[in-house]
Image: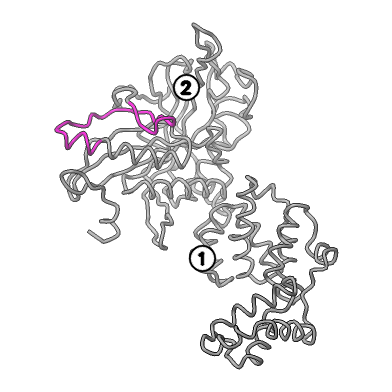
Amino acid sequence: MTQEAASKLIEGATGAWEVVIGLEVHAQISSNAKLFSGASTEFGAEQNQNVSLVDAAMPGMLPVINKKCVEQAVRTGLGLKAQINLRSVFDRKNYFYPDLPQGYQISQYKHPIVGEGAVLIDLPGGEMKTVGIERLHMEQDAGKSVHDQHPSMSFVDLNRSGVALMEIVTKPDMRSSEEAQAFVRKLRAILRYLGTCDGNMEQGSMRADVNVSVRKPGDEFGTRCEIKNVNSIRFVGLAIEYEARRQIDLIEDGGTVDQETRLFDIKTGKTRSMRSKEEAHDYRYFPDPDLLPLVFSQEWVDEIAKDLPELPDEKRERFIREYALSPYDASVLVSEKAIASFYEEVAETSDPKAAANWVTGDFFGALNKAGLAIESSPVSAKQLSELINLIQDGTISGRIAKEVFELMFDSGDDPAKIVEEKGLRQVTDTGAIEKAVDEVIAANPDKVEQVKEKPKMIGWFVGQVMKSTSGKANPQTVNELLAEKLGVSSDN
């Protein structure tokens, strides 16, 4: 076992345990209409407004496949570097629930549209890991039971009934909550780059069923429990950490883990039993008699492949190669399509490395503090590029640039306008800077003596000169003049 793998083990009373994790991610396909009807998929509509007779399972209503949804599933499979199956079959998955009007769900079982693939995830310390994809199949979503509108009755909202989903099933390749969270982040980024799912977990358009088991390192897989419908990346991590510890404690106390479906309670941070886990035979799968097998040509797949965008892994490698970025910076900048696009626009007209530092530093910090998405930023990519160029050409110092950026973020004004209105231009007149240097030296004779013994104290003098010039003096000129007048090296 590698040192990295050993660091992910969980200590129990009887020694170390390994957690084994697989995910089933349900991603809503980006499409204006549902999988088998023309009803709208718009989020936020009034209850039961986006419902066709097919969605409500009215007698005699037959499903008709939405070609756009099929194309989106194929596009996703290509993005996951997965096998595209030219022939797939829709099955009926039989179970009864109030928000499932047909009494079955149209899904895919033995013959999914997409087979095995792989996702490369980014982990702390620059580590990369491949997580295998077992399959991707299409299915229709159920409706939603509403329990809080009447004291003695529940209502059913069928707006989501029939909405097209991709269920993306991983292999049990993850060994920590951090790896599972990294996978969901990366998968969401890929889907957003492809335009096949918006990834809005808070709106329910992406959610994960988390399968967790534990074992002694090297042993066979243990009995797994499935945690249903986890709707945030943070909750994925918390659910895994609690469930792994629960199973370890249970086994070490002499108990056994029952295969079951559980729910994660966000209020308590614990999982709780929901029902015993069904097996495939419990659902009585059989091919849907109203839908022929789905068959398409390799030529059609190839046409879709031609239109694929540059995906995060390829973009990351290009950023490293073209912009000389570190692997870490490149990974951060490609983590979301909107971030990568913003960065590239900044880097087009300014120094790429400085652009990366500003985007991942002050810019991200300001967005987080304000609670804004990058699409809502008051500072445009063009304005940030202009600010960086004002530093590069010596108009302002790096210190003043931070002040200008804050004013830009508050007002939305261009940096050049702020610099002129506030009188923030950098002082490059050597005579004026030398006067400030002389005044600081004359006012601190004791420090002048000390700097001869401790040359690093030149930094204190630099700070005083910058303070006396309100940060406008050119730092390089200040350093050079102080080094000359104090008789110490400016490299200290």
Side of 51 where 428 appears, left or right: right
The range drawn in magenta is 247-272
**Which element type, helix, strand or loop, lies under badge 1?**
helix
Residue at 33% from the left image edge and 33% from the top image edge: 226
Residue at 55% from the left image edge and 25% from the top image edge: 160
Image quadrant in which the N terminus is located: bottom left
Which residue is the extreme one toward the right? 421
- The amino acid type found where label 1 is placed reads Glu
Q: Nearer the viewer, residue 422 or 389?
A: 422
- Residue 398 place in picture, x, y as percent: 68, 70
**Which element type, helix, strand or loop, lies under badge 2?**
loop
Residue 33 sits inside the magenta stretch: no
Can you identify the residue that label 1 sits on? 317
| Mark 2 surroundings within 10 Å by alpha-carbon count, few (fewer than 14), some (14 through 19), many (20 or more) | few
Side of 294 where 213 appears, left or right: left
Q: Nearer the viewer, residue 253 or 383?
A: 253
Q: Of circles 2 and 1, which is in front?
A: 1
Image quadrant in which the C terminus is located: bottom right
Q: Quadrant of residue 433?
A: bottom right
Can you identify the residue that label 2 sits on? 290
Residue 259 sits inside the magenta stretch: yes
Closer to the chain start, of discs 2 and 1, is: 2
**Residues marked 2 and 1 touching at CB (< 8 Å):** no
Q: Nearer the viewer, residue 61 or 334?
A: 334
- Residue 204 place in picture, x, y as percent: 53, 32
- The amino acid type found where label 2 is placed reads Asp
Please determine whether, in this image, residue 306 is positioned above or below residue 147.
below
- Residue 149 place in picture, x, y as percent: 56, 12
